[in-house]
């Protein structure tokens, strides 16, 4: 006889739907950019420079969000920029998560010398200033998409490792772990079948946060000109270029900035929303 | 020969002289219930954990032996030990709220051991789980087996843990304060249930508790612990009619009595504590 606790309904998660909706939109833009973008994102036309967005005076039809100082279409560049943003978010986020969560889980559950080695490694790692570290890394690796992803993974795995370690330690002290051990589970078996499912909600939240962070890091590196070649449209690159002409053409800066902001926000809210919806422990 | 024979078991915190168990000896015969009583910190739970091999990492066993059905546990390889413990013993843990994995359904948590260690088929194990839940008076077992722990009340979870402990027909169950985390009315039901199950299955039971009322109801033998030292090892009858050791007498006198509330809640006299502490110090001098 399960009592009424089983009947408690979860909140319908507006947060989940809004954030998932926005990310789906960005993903669609990334996939379909060549077909839905009204213009070639690289095509310059100096006669059409600094056109304002559609609701203002002096626009040209077809340039919905205006153009930058070289006459490139802002909307098309944002749509194409979504590709690099998403590639970085998904690949860098996932790799960071895999490495960090694995090390954190091992350290938190096995303890002993494994924990000692991993924890000291985290301490040392976190003492490096992250921005300088990433700039240094990219200087060594050379700019490019792969370098950015490597830089993000190398810098950010500690974020996962620390949190997952703490969580695994807390779970490891629970009686159900002792029961599983008495029932004959091996240590690794206990870690994977008993601890991991309980740490998973935290890992999912961290993963989505990390995807947002990856987008920001890519933008920052673009901003300091260490990302992809400046020809490829990226949101960070657009923001950097827009900054120089913000007084004459604010839209070149503001639209990619808002897109970036919404995307990062959507990633973090997606994680929280998923946790609310699917974590069996939360009511 | 006793089913469980602990001899001269000593333990301490790793890398310090802080002793936790001081030469503990006790036996549990097949089908017998032994109560292990003492104040908090006396080392009651530690003994149970040492037997099951789930001591915290910071604690090391420094000497003694644990014979389970004639096999020395302390020298066994981890894999062999795990198999032996898994097949012949079980634990009823203290806190039902943390003793079930919150992210797994109830069913597999009961049947894991049957399938993994004893090699039962999934369907036979499921049938057994249903039967067990029936036995611990849970109505609608099929639904409960599919539920998650948070959907069930504390008393219900403790019933499930009891069912789970008896699942593989172990020869020995260690109950680590199984009623402490429950409220008083539920405590009584759970205690009765454990006693009934124990009698029906003929399982030996090591009952760790600080509640002498519990001991009086279910135990045949009693070990009284102070500072990791067994100060008295006697039968329940002898204990409640007139314990030999002054500390045991004081512990018994400190138990609240419903019949005479005025006389209840007697603290243990300082002189008795001093005497029993002297025993502990004497042990430490004798065994360096």
Image (cartoon, coloured by chain):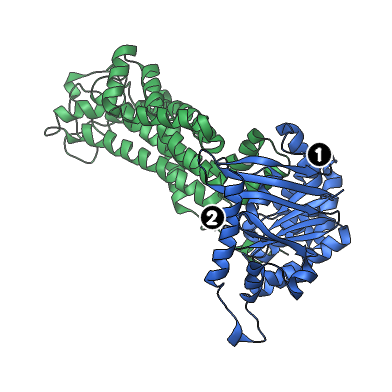
Q: Is residue A107 above or below residue B106?
A: above
Image coords of residue A48 (percent x, y)? 19, 24
Is A59 left or right of A122, judged from the image as shown?
left
Asked if residue B247 can be seen in this view, the reply is: yes
Nearest to the eye among marks 1 and 2: give it.
1
Image coords of residue B218 (percent x, y)? 78, 67
Residue closest to the eye, B89 or A36: B89
Q: Residues within 10 Å of mark 2 (few under 14, many from 20)?
A: few
Q: Which mark is residue B71?
A: 1
The quarter of the displayed image where residue A80 is located: top left
Quadrant of image for the N terminus of chain A: bottom right
Q: Chain of mark 2?
A: A
Task: Label 2, secondary structure: give it.
Answer: loop
Q: Which residue is mark 2?
A: A282
Q: Chain of mark 1?
A: B
Image coords of residue A52 (percent x, y)? 19, 34
Task: Label 1, secondary structure: give it.
Answer: strand
The quarter of the displayed image where residue B163 is located: bottom right
Q: Which chain is blue?
A: B
Quadrant of image for the C terminus of chain A: bottom right
Residue sitting at x 21%, y 19%: A45
Q: Is residue B274 above or below residue B78?
A: below
Q: Residues within 10 Å of mark 1 (few under 14, many from 20)?
A: some
Residue closest to the eye, B287 or B201: B287
Colour in which chain A is drawn: green
Is A109 left or right of B75, judged from the image as shown?
left
The quarter of the displayed image where residue B257 is located: bottom right
Is B219 left or right of B212, judged from the image as shown?
right
Q: Which mark is residue A246?
A: none
């Amino acid at each position: 006889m399960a009592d009424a606790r089983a009947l408690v309904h979860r909140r319908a998660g507006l947060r989940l739907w809004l954030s998932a909706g926005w990310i789906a939109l960005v993903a669609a833009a990334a996939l379909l950019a060549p077909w839905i973008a009204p213009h070639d994102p690289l095509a310059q036309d100096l006669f059409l420079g600094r056109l304002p967005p559609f609701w203002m005076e002096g626009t040209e039809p077809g340039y919905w969000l205006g153009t930058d100082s070289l006459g490139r279409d802002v909307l098309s560049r944002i749509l194409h920029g979504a590709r690099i943003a998403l590639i970085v978010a998904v690949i860098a986020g996932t790799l960071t998560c895999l490495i960090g969560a694995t090390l954190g889980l091992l350290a938190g559950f096995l303890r002993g010398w494994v924990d000692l080695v991993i924890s000291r490694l985290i301490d040392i790692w976190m003492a490096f200033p992250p921005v300088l570290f990433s700039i240094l890394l990219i200087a060594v690796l050379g700019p490019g998409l792969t370098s950015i992803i490597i830089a993000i993974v190398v810098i950010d795995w500690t974020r996962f490792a620390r949190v997952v370690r703490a969580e695994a330690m807390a779970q490891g002290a629970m009686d159900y772990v002792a029961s599983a051990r008495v029932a004959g589970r091996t240590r690794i078996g206990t870690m994977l079948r008993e601890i991991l499912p309980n740490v998973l909600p935290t890992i999912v939240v961290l993963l989505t946060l990390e995807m947002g962070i990856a987008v920001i890091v890519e933008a920052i590196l673009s901003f300091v000109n260490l990302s992809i070649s400046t020809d490829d449209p990226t949101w960070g690159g657009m923001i950097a270029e827009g900054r120089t002409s913000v007084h004459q053409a604010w839209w070149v800066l503001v639209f990619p900035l808002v897109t970036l902001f919404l995307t990062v926000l959507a990633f973090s809210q997606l994680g929280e929303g998923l946790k609310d919806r699917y974590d069996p422990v939360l009511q | 020969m006793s089913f469980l024979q602990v001899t001269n078991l000593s333990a301490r915190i790793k890398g310090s002289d802080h002793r936790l168990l001081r030469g503990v000896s006790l036996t549990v015969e097949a089908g017998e219930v032994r109560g292990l009583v003492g104040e908090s910190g006396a080392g009651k739970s530690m003994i149970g954990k040492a037997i099951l091999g789930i001591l915290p990492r910071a604690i090391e066993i420094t000497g003694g032996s644990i014979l389970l059905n004639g096999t020395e546990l302390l020298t066994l390889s981890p894999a062999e030990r795990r198999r032996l413990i898994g097949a012949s013993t079980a634990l009823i843990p203290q806190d039902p709220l943390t003793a079930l994995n919150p992210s797994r359904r109830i069913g597999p948590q009961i049947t894991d051991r049957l399938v993994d260690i004893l090699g039962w088929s999934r369907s036979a194990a499921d049938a057994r789980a249903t039967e067990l839940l029936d036995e611990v008076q849970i109505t609608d077992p099929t639904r409960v087996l599919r539920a998650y722990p948070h959907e069930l009340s504390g008393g219900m979870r403790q019933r499930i843990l009891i069912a789970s402990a008896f699942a593989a027909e172990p020869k020995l169950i260690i109950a680590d304060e199984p009623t402490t985390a429950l409220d008083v009315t539920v405590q009584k039901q759970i205690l009765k249930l454990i006693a009934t199950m124990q009698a029906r299955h003929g399982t030996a039971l090591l009952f760790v508790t600080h509640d002498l009322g519990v001991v009086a109801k279910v135990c045949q033998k009693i070990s009284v612990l102070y500072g990791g030292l067994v100060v008295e090892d006697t039968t329940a009858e002898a204990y409640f009619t007139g314990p030999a050791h002054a500390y045991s007498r004081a512990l018994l006198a400190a138990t609240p009595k419903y019949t005479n509330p005025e006389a209840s809640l007697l603290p243990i006299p300082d002189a008795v504590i001093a005497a029993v502490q002297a025993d502990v110090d004497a042990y430490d001098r004798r065994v360096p």
